[in-house]
Each structure stands twice: as structure tokens, then as C-alpha cells.
Image: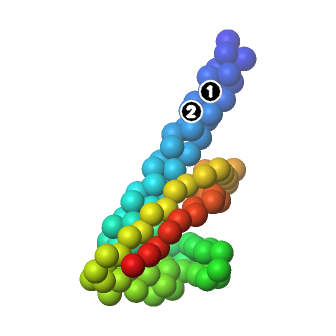
Amino acid sequence: MEALERDLEQLELFAEGLSDMDAILNRFYRYIHYYGELHINGTMEQFSTRDDVSLEIAEEGIFEGYERIKEYFSFMPKLARKPGIMIYHYVDTPVVEIAGDGKTAKLTCLASGLDAA
């Protein structure tokens, strides 16, 4: 019976990990959606307000902290008013790493795209 309880506990932890990964990926896909719509509030709602949150954009650098990330995206309202703006991004090879305690995670992926006017 003890082995069965141990197996059940492991299965529950595995299922929780899958659920967490799904939630993280969905949040990122919402970020891509709102970014494409140039919706700054929706974009920023996808980021944690924790002090250790960060965003790395290849050619732009690493933005650490919620306020710094929000500052980076401050171009969105002005760009959204530009006639003919088109933003298209797609996501490839997402990798989610969840910390052992299950309290933090890191997502790495390719999110190539086109921003044009």
C-alpha cells in the first residue's frame, strides 16, 4: 500500500507539472497575441510583477523587472496609431523549465516575426 501511495503522489506531481507547463505556454501565447495587436495592457498583464521577472529580446537586450519591461513596451500606443502597421510573430520550440519547488519557471523559445508599416 505504501508503494501505491508513493506512486500516486508521483503521478499527482507529474500532472501538476503538466498543468503548470500548459498555463505558462498559454500565458506566453496570450503575450504574443496582445503584442501583435499592440495592446500594451494585455501584453503587460502576461508578466509577473515579481522583482525577478525578466524579458530577453535578441537584438534589444535583457529587461529586468516589471517596470523596465513596461518601459520597453512604451512604444506600443504610438505604433498602434501608425497607418498600415502589421505585426506577425510565430513561436517555435518553446522550452519550459519549472523550478523544483514549483514556484518559478523560465520559458525560452524562438519568437521570430515581422513588424512592418
Helix, strand or loop at label 2? It is: helix
The amino acid type found where label 2 is placed reads Ala
Residue 27 at x, y = what percent?
45, 55
Q: Is residue 52 visible?
A: no
For this rendering, which residue is in front, 83 or 58?
A: 83
Relative to 41, say whether 46 is above or below. Answer: above
For this rendering, which residue is in front, 71 or 60?
A: 60
**Distance (Cα) linking label 2 and label 1:** 6 Å
The residue at 63%/58% (across/down) is 109
Q: Which residue is mark 1?
A: 11
Q: Quadrant of the N terminus?
A: top right
Residue 41 at x, y = what percent?
32, 73
Q: Which residue is mark 2?
A: 15
Q: Quadrant of the C terminus?
A: bottom left
The amino acid type found where label 1 is placed reads Leu
Q: Is residue 29 visible?
A: yes
Helix, strand or loop at label 1? It is: helix
Residue 45's tag is none
State yes or no: discs 2 and 1 in contact (Cβ < 8 Å): yes
Residue 51 at x, y = what percent?
55, 77
Relative to 88, say whether 56 is above or below. Answer: below
View extreme (right): residue: 3
The residue at 56%/45% (across/down) is 21
- Which quadrant of the view contains residue 32? bottom left
Q: Is residue 83 left or right of residue 9?
A: left
Q: Is residue 106 left or right of residue 113?
A: right
Relative to 30, say whether 63 is above or below. Answer: below
